[in-house]
Amino acid sequence: MGAAPGGKPENKAGRDAAAWVFNIVTSVGIIMVNKALMATHGFGFVTTLPGIHFATTALVTLILKSLGYIEPSYLPLPELMKYVTFANISVVGMNASLMWNSIGFYQVSKLSMVLVLCMLEVLFDSVRYSKGTKLSIMVVLVGVAICTVTDVTVNTKGLIAAAVAVCSTAFQQHYIHHLQKKYSLSAFHLLSHTAPAQAASLLLLGPFVDLWLTNNRVDTYHYNNMVMFFIALSCVIAVGTNLSQFICIGRFTAVSFQVLGHMKTILVLTMGFVLFGREGLNVHVAFGMILAVVGMVWYNHASSRPGGKERQGYQEPVKEDIEQGVQPSQLQPDEKN
């Protein structure tokens, strides 16, 4: 349906909000389901499980493409392989961190991802942040840290997994934004390229990597109806999680995706207390949640102001850029939100 010119900002705000809600619901859901699989049912095959997730996602994109809902698009093989490498290490690292760490430390370790992404934007995208934007990010991190400090246990194996997960995920999310802008790819386009490659590589390597990580074989695990239900549920949610990540990073930036996405941390932590035997919320945790929300609102305001977050050294698009499908609007110096 068409919209009046005056309604465009409202429509965009509504679509942005819908994208965030979609991402929050699917991300929180898959963390809870995977944690139940690992902690309650001992299904610790953190490489094979994502392979099944991506196989399901690839099947969905194949069906949509055959029905004409996804148009053909182009992504060079070297770019695809580079992305798949980052993404596969990220998936395995995140699931290993979730398996070997408490939910609290899993979330705390992800705080550093914002700092890594900021560094990547400064180094590779020539982005500069205002003082207000930097302070708002720190408020978010402090607030989320306060929320999780009562639920932090650390072990060497989990610490290594968390470090690998954070660095690889930061590179992957930064690369998503790069690919979508450079090749004018929608979330469905990028997913149709990456999901089959990730599924094939993870399912091929998964059983061997999982045997090395857990000393257990995925084919000898005792499957029952409850485990199969959780695996199927995890696959369904994973399709939404993969899609929503591409949608959000495409609409915003990887840093904004992480900063505002810490709302998921609050929800995950709350549900973790309820579902996995932790004590309920207290004043200490509530204060951290309020501080984090204040920081998120502040970040959104500070980064959207002139000079709050902008790309330095902007140049006019050249003919080669336009011929390769890069639109002038994609090369604007400011990246808001």
Image: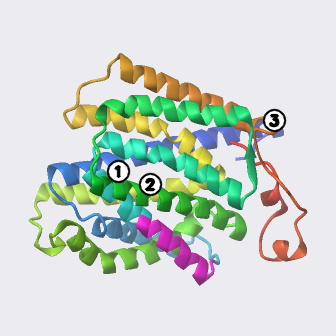
**321 relative position to 269: left or right:** right
Q: Earlier in the sequence, mark 1 or mark 3?
A: 3
Q: Picture quarter containing residue 287?
A: top left
Q: Amino acid at mark 3?
A: Gly
Instruction: Provide the residue span drawn in magenta.
Output: 75-89
Marks 1 and 3 sit apart, C-alpha to C-alpha, by 38 Å
**69 relative position to 11: left or right:** left
Q: Residue at x 31, y 42 (%)?
A: 103
Q: Earlier in the sequence, mark 2 or mark 3?
A: 3
Point out the frontmost of discs 2 and 3.
Answer: 2
Labelled pair 2, 1 in contact (Cβ < 8 Å): yes
Mark 1 sits on what residue? Answer: 30
Q: Residue at x 51, y 29 (%)?
A: 292
- Rendered location of residue 219, percent (x, y): 15, 74
Mark 2 sits on what residue? Answer: 241
Q: Nearer the viewer, residue 204 or 125?
A: 125
Q: Nearer the viewer, residue 63 or 54?
A: 54
Q: Is residue 135 magenta?
A: no
Q: Picture quarter containing residue 91?
A: bottom left
**181 relative position to 261: left or right:** right
Give me the disc on residue 6. Answer: 3
Q: Residue at x 71, y 38 (%)?
A: 303
Q: Residue furthest bottom?
A: 77
